[in-house]
């Protein structure tokens, strides 16, 4: 009997040790500075972790004024698994007191793992400037060129600076880089970064004596480009309403795609007859698309009784209906989307273009197509300038409302 009690006491002691270890390794609440390592560069972002009673851990990715809620967090005795928003991606890390150390993983990609580390109690983003040299002023509006291997892509940069702190974004013909945050470092180094749970962007630059910015842009594991910018208050992009267009001889869009229940949806369906219809070409992997979806969801809730419908056409990372359905279903639930959403194809633009052959091509997600009550295409808007672009987002909303109001009153001439 004594031996049995001895074994029991040893076992109980071990259980107690493990319980203490789990308590020691609990995820600390508060501010964290996170870093992922891409192409031998540190890309920093900030996290805020809280514990909600009877709910569990909640985490926010912070980029400037944006806070991205992460509410699927699993903590064990010594590790944490974080589902990254709506994306098919995770951060998996060991909890080492004031440090998290692990990997950022894109599940849909083959062997896509990037080292991740976070330190508790650090609220800065980039290392603070320590030199006493004057800090150059990067604030303003810039005409930008991103230099690819075979061509250049125009952009507009808008930056705001307070002391050493920088925020801003880049607008391009296919969308914006959303909320960028950073600072001016030693040697007058321009530094901006963002991490949204799926995309990781880092921008650096120096200002030449004449004022031109020459810098480098890093995205994910492999993409690196040179960018050049000159201050220009009149900088602008090509007309977003003229980049995507119908093939000659076409004036309508036709398709038959399944919704998440497998039911075929077509513009010939009765619910769309004699109504203005807005088609949203999007992907759940696309942050600009999610920004537009938030706008469209609230807009539709306020306007659905005016004789207007929206159909979301999802183009996902894999050519697999079950995979696409699950990604779309999660988005519908997260945003409480009340309009129809269908599975249209994959995110490969060449393949996507074949799903709507009456278009010259699909060059961007999102792309928004406005159809009049007569069933004819009236306008196609390429890309999206989201809330991170400030007044450009306000202009988009104004023009969106003007377009729909005009279509509801009277059909516009064909483009």
Image (cartoon, grey):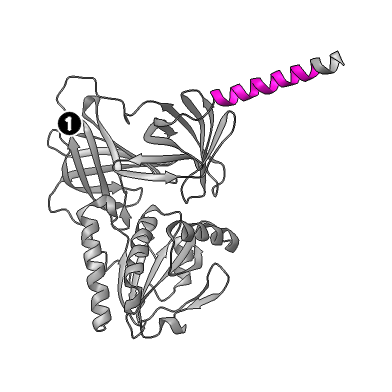
Q: Residue furthest front?
A: 1
Above or below, 275 relative to 2: below
Query: Quadrant location of the N terminus?
Result: top right
Magenta: predominant secondary structure element? helix
Image x and y of residue 106, in percent: 52, 45
Q: Exactly how many numbered labels are in the figure?
A: 1
User: Which segment did they paint magenta?
Assistant: 7-24
Image x and y of residue 42, in percent: 39, 31
Query: Quadrant location of the C terminus?
Result: bottom left
Say if the magenta span includes residue 249: no
Residue plotted at (80% across, 15% down)? 6
Left or right, 284 with respect to 133, comes to right
Image x and y of residue 389, in percent: 25, 51
Quarter location, residue 336:
bottom left
Q: Residue furthest right?
A: 1
Left or right, 315 with respect to 409, comes to right
Crowding around mark 1 (Cα neighbors within 10 Å: few <14, some 14 to 19, many 20+) is few
Image x and y of residue 304, in percent: 35, 74
Name the element at disc 1: loop
Say if the magenta span includes residue 17: yes
Residue plotted at (17% across, 19% down)? 132
Residue plotted at (48% across, 45% down)? 71
Residue annotated with mark 1: 163
Quarter location, residue 367:
bottom left
């Amino acid at each position: 009997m004594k031996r049995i009690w001895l074994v029991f006491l040893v076992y109980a002691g071990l259980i107690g040790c493990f319980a203490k270890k789990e308590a020691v390794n609990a995820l600390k609440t508060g501010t964290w500075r996170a870093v992922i390592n891409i192409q031998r560069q540190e890309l920093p972002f900030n996290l805020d972790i809280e514990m909600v009673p009877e709910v569990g851990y909640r985490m926010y990715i912070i980029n400037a004024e944006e806070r991205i809620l992460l509410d699927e967090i699993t903590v064990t005795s010594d590790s944490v698994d974080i589902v990254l928003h709506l994306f098919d991606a995770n951060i998996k890390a060991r909890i080492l007191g004031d440090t998290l150390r692990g990997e950022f993983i894109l599940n849909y990609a083959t062997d896509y793992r990037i080292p991740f580390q976070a330190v508790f109690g650090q609220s800065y983003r980039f290392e603070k400037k320590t030199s006493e040299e004057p800090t150059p002023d990067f604030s303003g509006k810039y005409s930008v060129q991103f230099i690819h291997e075979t061509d250049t892509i125009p952009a507009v940069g808008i930056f705001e600076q307070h002391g050493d702190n920088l925020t801003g974004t880049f607008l391009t013909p296919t969308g914006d880089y959303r909320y960028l945050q950073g600072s001016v470092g030693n040697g007058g180094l321009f530094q901006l970064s963002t991490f949204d749970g799926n995309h990781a962007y880092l921008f650096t630059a120096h200002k030449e004596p004449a004022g031109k910015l020459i810098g480098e842009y890093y995205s994910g594991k492999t993409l690196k480009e040179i960018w050049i910018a000159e201050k220009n208050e009149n900088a602008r992009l090509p007309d977003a309403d003229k980049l995507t267009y119908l093939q000659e001889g076409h004036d309508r869009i036709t398709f038959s795609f399944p919704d998440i229940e497998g039911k075929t949806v077509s513009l010939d369906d009765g619910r769309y007859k004699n109504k203005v219809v807005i088609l949203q070409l999007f992907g759940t992997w696309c942050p600009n698309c999610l920004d537009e979806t938030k706008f469209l969801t609230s807009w539709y809730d306020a306007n659905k009784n005016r004789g207007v419908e929206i159909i979301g056409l999802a183009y996902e990372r894999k050519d697999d209906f079950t995979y696409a359905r699950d990604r779309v279903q999660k988005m519908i639930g997260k945003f409480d989307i009340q309009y129809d959403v269908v599975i249209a194809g994959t995110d490969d633009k060449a393949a996507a273009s074949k799903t709507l052959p009456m278009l010259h091509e699909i060059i961007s997600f999102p792309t928004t197509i406005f159809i009049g009550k007569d069933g004819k295409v009236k306008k196609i808007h390429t890309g999206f300038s989201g809330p991170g672009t400030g007044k450009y987002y306000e202009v988009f909303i104004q023009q969106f409302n003007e377009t729909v109001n005009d279509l509801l009153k009277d059909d516009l001439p064909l483009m």
